Amino acid sequence: MFFYSFNYWLFMLPALLLTLIAQFLVNSAYRKWSRRENSHGITGLDAARRILSYADLQDVSIEPSSGRLSDHYDPRTKTLHLSPDIARGQSVASMAIAAHEIGHAMQDQANDFSLRFRSALVPAVNIGSYLGWILIIVGLLLGGILGTNLAWLGVGAFSLGLLFALVTLPLEFNASARGHRLLIDTGLISTKEDDRGVKSVLNAAALTYVAALATAALQLLYYISLVTGSSRRR
């Protein structure tokens, strides 16, 4: 199928390499700092409780989350979900990840427009990622004005994924910055080693969102070139 032609992989190769590098750095940072106990010997769950109390986020509840590194904050229910390794772990990584997710809770408390906009985008992005390629295929096969319009509609549907990635990137950087500051303000970071570990984990995680943005952008460029090239041939 033309979607997976040589040109497709030519477009996507930089994003693929960046994704692999990001995953390597995340796994490497997490593996290293999940073995280093933080200076307070505090679990991720206890760190989360301490930070929530300090930030006066009394309406945020903590619930377990299944799976490895499945930690997230749900603004709809104001719930912080912590995976078993993070909740029970006494590592620097556990502390860093819990603080990052509470950074999102603080964004929610501040009624951050970007956070709410991203949440509102989720259904549209899911539909767009499913229908986009169908509309492009049908449009290119159909041809003519109607086919071209359908194909461009598919490109528009895929562009929602890029918009989502663009909104997500600054939100994640901001959540990390908030989390890091909370760990300092609560005294949970009290040594240079803890600070170095927290920064290493958060910076590595941030790179995955850079890779996601690059992937979305290059994929959209490929689809645009596909539809544009087809239109010129006609």
Image (cartoon, rainbow, N blue to C red):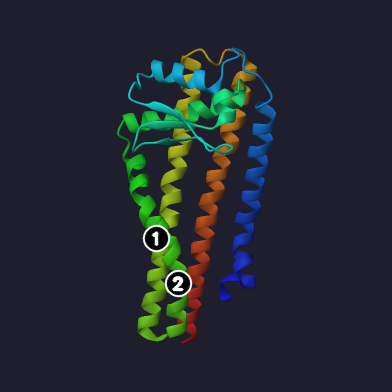
Is label 2 in a helix, a strand or a loop?
A: helix
Q: Quadrant of residue 63?
A: top left
Of residue 63 and residue 116, the one placed in the foreground of this image is: 63
According to the image, label 1 marks what residue?
127
Is label 1 in a helix, a strand or a loop?
A: helix
Measure how far apart labels 1 and 2 are at the Cα level: 11 Å
Earlier sequence position, callout 1 versus callout 2: 1
Q: Quadrant of residue 83?
A: top right
> Residue 154 placed where, x, y %?
41, 69
Residue type at mark 2: give it.
Answer: Ile
Of residue 115 and residue 53, the one placed in the foreground of this image is: 53
- Residue 27 shown left or right of residue 172 in the figure: right
Q: Quadrant of residue 24?
A: top right
> Residue 47 placed where, x, y %?
50, 19
| Residue 129 vertical placement versus 227 (above, below) | above
Residue occupying the point 53% across, 15% down? 188
According to the image, label 2 marks what residue?
134
| Residue 99 vertical placement versus 121 (above, below) | above
Residue occupying the point 34% across, 21% down? 58
| Residue 195 vertical placement versus 233 (above, below) | above
Residue type at mark 1: give it.
Answer: Ile
Residue occupying the point 68% across, 32% down? 31
Quadrant of image for the N terminus = bottom right
* Circle number at residue 140: none
For disc 1, the neighbor class at 10 Å (few under 14, some 14 to 19, many from 20) is: few
For disc 2, the neighbor class at 10 Å (few under 14, some 14 to 19, many from 20) is: some
Of residue 43 and residue 40, the one placed in the foreground of this image is: 43
| Residue 222 vertical placement versus 86 (above, below) | below
> Residue 23 placed where, x, y %?
64, 44
